[in-house]
Amino acid sequence: MDRNAVNAGTEMVIDRISSLPEDIVHHVMSLLSTVEVTRTSILSKRFNSIWSTFPVIDFDEYLFLIGTPSIDLRDQSKIDEFLNFVDNSLQRRRSNISLKRFRLRVAFCYVKSDPRINRSIDFALESNVQELDLDIHLQNGLKYYNLPHRVLAAKSIKVLKLEGCNLGVQDLILNCPLMEDFRLKDCDGLKSIMVSTAKLLSLELDCCKELERIEVDARNLQSFFFIPSRRSSVTKPCEINLCACEFLKTLKVGGPSITDKWFECHVPKFTLLEMLSLDGCETLQKIKISLQRLKSFELLRCLNIVDAELDAPNLLSFTFCGWTPPSTPLATLRCSDLLHARVSWQPIATTAKSSIASRNFLALFNHCEVLTLVCSISKHRRFLEELDGSWLPPLHDLKHLRVEIGYLVASFKNWRDGCSVVPNWQPVKYTKLVDRLLQLCPHPETLVIANDHLQMLIEFQYAGRAVEDNADCCCRGWLRKCWRHDLKHVTLWRFKHNDQESLVKFFINNGKMLETITVDRKTFKVVQGK
C-alpha cells in the first residue's frame, strides 16, 4: 500500500503533496503565512523536514492573533503566546540552513529587551540571513527596543530594515560589504551616520529626528530618503552630504536641512534623477530644476517657496500640496504633454488677488493629459464663484479633469497628514459645481467628480464644427468656443436621481447643438427648443 495513502471511511485518500519535490513545496509555503507553514510542519516528518529548510521566515503578531475572537491585542498573555510561538518554532528548525529573509513584527512589546526576541535575532544572524526586517513597537510609555549590537556588525546582510529600535550607538559607520538596502524608521540613539559601501543602492532614514549629520560615500546609490520627523516643530537641521552619489535616481528629502544652498549644491548634479520629492522643506524659498530624465516631482508643504522653475521635458507625474500666496509659487513648468498632475491647494485669503494667483497657477497645467484638483467647497467658494465668461479660462486645452471634493487637513505642519483629504459631509449642488468647472475647463472630454466613496463621471462628445453665435456670446474673446457651441452628446454616470435630472436640464438648456444624452446606459434624444 502507498505509504502516503490513508483510509477515509470506505474511500482511499492519497496524500500527493508529500510526494512533491522540495522546491515546489517551498513555493507553496511561500504563499502561506509563517503561522500556517509551521502548523503544516507537524503533519508529517517530511513536512517538518521541508519546513526546517524553508529559507523565508515571517513572524507577524497581527497575523498570529487576528483569527482569535474577541481578543485585546494589548493583552500581555497573548503577546507572550506569540513570542513563545516564535521561540518554539525556531527551535524545531535546522540552524545550519541559510536564510534569504527573516521578518519579525511585534506590535505590542512591554519591555526594552526580551530574550525570546533576541534569540530569534541570533537565529537569523547565525543562519547568515540576507534580509533582516525588525519592526518592534513598545507600550507602557516605553519608546524604543534595545537592538543587539551584533545586528549592525553582521556581514551576510544585504537588506536591513529596522523600526522602533534604539541602535545603541551615536555615530554609525556603515561599511557592510554586501549591504544593498538600509532602512531606519522611527529609530533612536543615532547622531551621525557615515555610509561607505560600494554595493549600497537604497538608503532610507525616516523619522530619525536625532540625526545631526549624514555622510554618504556610495557612488552606486540610486535611492535616498530622509524625513527627520512627522512634525516640523520637533526637528533641527541635519548636515547632509550626497555629493558622491552621482547615479542617484530617486531623491526624497524634507525638513529644515533642505535650504536654498543645499538644493543648489546637490540637485543639479543628479543628472540621472527620475523621481524628486520635496516634503516640508520649510526653509526652502527658491528652486530651479532642469533635469532631462525627471519623470516624477512632488512639491509638498514647502510653504515658504516664492519662486520655482521646473524644466523637465519628460515629466509624467507632478504633485503639489500647499497654498497659493499672492504670487504663484511655480513660475514656469515645462513638461511632457502626457503629464498627470495632482494639485491640492488652499488660497491664503479669499481676495481677488489670491483668486488671480490661483488662476495663474492652474494655467500652468493647461496642456497636461490629466489634472486632479482637490477642492474644498468652503475654501474655494469665492474662487469658483468668480469663474465666469469675463475671465479667460486657465484650462482651455485640458481634456481630462478630475475633482476630489473634501477638506484638506488644516495644519500643514504634520507632514504625513498635511495633504490628506477628509470626506465632505455637506450636500453638494453638482449642477452649480459642474457649471463652474466648465468655466475653468471649457472643453473637456471627461470630468470626474469624486466625493467620498462616490465616483461620478461626465463624458463629452463634440461636433466637428461650432455653431455661430456672436450676439451676446458667453465666451467672447476666448481662444476657442466653449462646450455650449459644439457639444453633441453627453453621458452621465453614477449621479443620484435628483442630480441626474438637474444636470440633464442644465445640458439641454445650454447645449446649442446637443443631440443625445445618456444616463447610466439609457440614451435620450434631445429636441432643440422643447
Image (cartoon, helix red, strand yellow):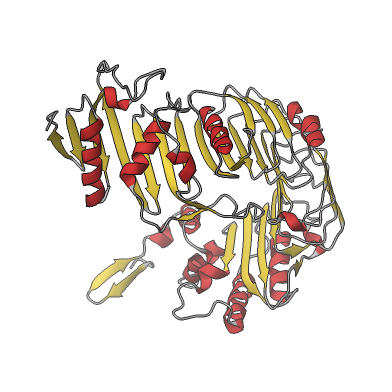
Residue 226 placed where, x, y %? 72, 47
Q: Nearer the viewer, residue 290 or 365?
A: 365
Q: Nearer the viewer, residue 487 or 22?
A: 487
**Residue 214 visible (yes or no):** yes
| 97 lies above or below 13 | above
Residue at figure coordinates x 52%, y 32% from the top left: 359
For the N terminus, give its image quadrant. bottom left
Count of numbered badges drawn on the protein: 0
Residue 308 placed where, x, y %? 67, 30
| 443 lies above or below 157 | above
Residue at figure coordinates x 73%, y 65% from the top left: 122
Q: Is residue 367 left or right of residue 261?
A: left
Q: Is residue 305 left or right of residue 49?
A: right
**Residue 203 visible (yes or no):** no
**Residue furthest bottom in the image:** 77
Residue 415 placed where, x, y %? 65, 52
| 119 lies above or below 190 | below
| 369 lies above or below 422 | above
Q: Is residue 122 left or right of residue 426?
A: right
Residue at figure coordinates x 74%, y 68% from the top left: 144
Image quadrant of residue 469? top left
For the C terminus, give its image quadrant. top left
Residue 148 placed where, x, y %? 79, 65
Image quadrant of residue 518? top left
Residue at figure coordinates x 28%, y 27% from the top left: 484
